[in-house]
Every structure is written in structure tokens, then in C-alpha cells.
Amino acid sequence: MSTIDQQFIEYIVKSLVGHPDDVMVERMIDEKGVLLTLTVNPEDLGRVIGKRGVTAQSLRTLLRALGTKNDARYNLKIENNDEQHKVYDNTTTSYDQNNNTVENSTDEPVDNASDYSKKTREELAELDDLDI
């Protein structure tokens, strides 16, 4: 039997996603309040989170309003159940187009600094030397 808060989140999320049958909301009560764990189809994860997390933040805001009415504190956790993006033992497992496993080690530092960022750092360093 689901509670009003679970039904509330399920209704909203099922309206957003492409696979509404895969939406599950689990409820757990702890010392911090009520934790709702949302699980959706991996293809719908982006829709639930939204650009820059705006949709997820809106869901949390609506839950906060519901909590005000019910004298409860709600927390929403969106689970990523996509097997391709899980991290194991400091390495990221990913898959190529033929579904072959490709291991990428995260132990070595990578220098991704572009020419633009290097130039900007140099200009900022020059500005620090000025006595203003």
C-alpha cells in the first residue's frame, strides 16, 4: 500500500517519462525524515533530472510543500540503475558499440587544460603582479 507522498511523486514522474511502467518509489523513514527513493528506466533519467537538475529540484520543492502540509520532512533520492555508469574499484566500466567492456583507469591524472584556459591563467597571473 503506497502513501500519499509516494502516489504524488509517482503521478508526476509517470507524466514526464517515456516508460511509466518502470517508475518505482520506495519510502523509508529515518531520523532525518522521510526518504523517497525514485527509480526510473535509464532512458528516462535525463527527463527526471532535467537540464542542470531543474526538474529534480522542482520535484523536491513540491515535496517540501507537501511536507509543510503533512508536518514531515521529505528527501528525494533519484537512483541511477544504469549498469553502464556504475563505478567499481576506482575504474569506470563502459561499453563500446559492440557491447564489449572497455576499462578506463582513473588512477592517472589527465591534463585537459585548453589553450584558452592556459592563456586566461597567464593573464590573471599578470594582473596579480600589478600594484593597484
Image (cartoon, grey):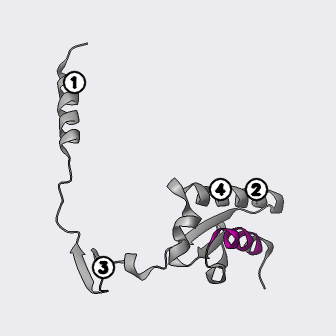
Indicate the position of residue 122 as horizontal and vertical percent values.
17, 32
Label at residue 128: 1
Residue type at mark 3 is: Thr
Residue at label 3?
A: 93
Q: How many marks?
A: 4
| Majority secondary structure in the magenta region | helix
Element class at badge 3? strand
Residue at label 2?
A: 65
Indicate the position of residue 25 as horizontal and vertical percent values.
66, 77
The answer to whether residue 32 is seen in the rendering is: no
Q: Residue at x 58, y 77 (%)?
A: 39
109 and 40: which is toward the camera = 40
Q: CA distance from mark 2 to mark 1?
A: 47 Å
Label at residue 58: 4
Binning the other alpha carbons within 10 Å of mark 1 as few (below 14), some (14 to 19) or many (20 upward) gives few
Give the mark nearest the N terminus, 1 or 3: 3
Q: Nearer the viewer, mark 1 or mark 3?
A: 3
Q: Quadrant of residue 63?
A: bottom right
Q: CA distance from mark 4 to mark 3?
A: 31 Å
Give the mark nearest the N terminus, 4 or 3: 4
